[in-house]
């Protein structure tokens, strides 16, 4: 998303959905977009783990 404030971003997401969308779908979409933004912010800040570390963790499952 762009550098809008949270309210404007939510309105943009909702406006892009069809008029027949269920409330649960709206909430889900907003939740997913928020989690993606949080992950991107953490990555920019150097938080998280590398791809190699992730693969190693998955191998341990």
Image (tube, helix red, strand yellow):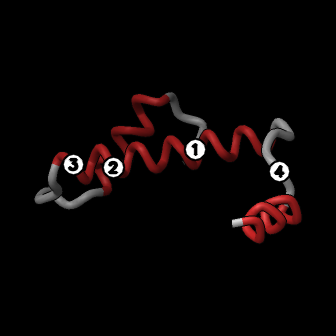
Return the residue at label 1.
Answer: 2
**Helix or strand or loop: what does disc 1 sit on?**
loop
Question: Residue at (83%, 65%) from the top-left corner?
Answer: 56
Mark nearer the N terminus (3 vs 1): 1
Q: Residues within 10 Å of mark 3 (few under 14, many from 20)?
A: few
Task: Quadrant for residue 44, please give it.
Answer: top right
Which numbered circle lies on residue 49? 4
Does label 4 or label 3 sit earlier along the sequence?
A: 3
Which residue is under mark 2?
28
Q: Which mark is residue 24?
A: 3
Q: CA distance from mark 3 to mark 1?
A: 24 Å
Name the front one of labels 3 and 1. 3
Q: Are marks 3 and 2 in contact (CB under 8 Å)?
A: yes
Mark 1 against mark 4, which lies toward the viewer?
A: 4
Q: Residues within 10 Å of mark 4 (few under 14, many from 20)?
A: few
Image coordinates of residue 18 in percent, x first then y, are: 20, 61
Q: Crowding at label 1, few (<14), some or many (≥20) Cα neighbours within 10 Å?
A: few
Tell me where residue 19 sits by quadrant. Answer: bottom left
Q: Please, what secondary structure does the residue beneath circle 2 have?
A: helix
Q: Residue at x 86, y 56 (%)?
A: 50
Q: Earlier in the sequence, mark 2 or mark 4?
A: 2
């Amino acid at each position: 998303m762009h550098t809008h404030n949270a309210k404007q971003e939510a309105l943009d997401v909702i406006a892009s959905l069809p008029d027949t969308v269920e409330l649960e779908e709206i909430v889900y979409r907003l939740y997913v977009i928020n989690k993606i933004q949080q992950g991107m912010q953490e990555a920019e800040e150097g938080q998280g783990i590398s791809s190699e570390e992730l693969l190693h963790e998955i191998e341990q499952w």
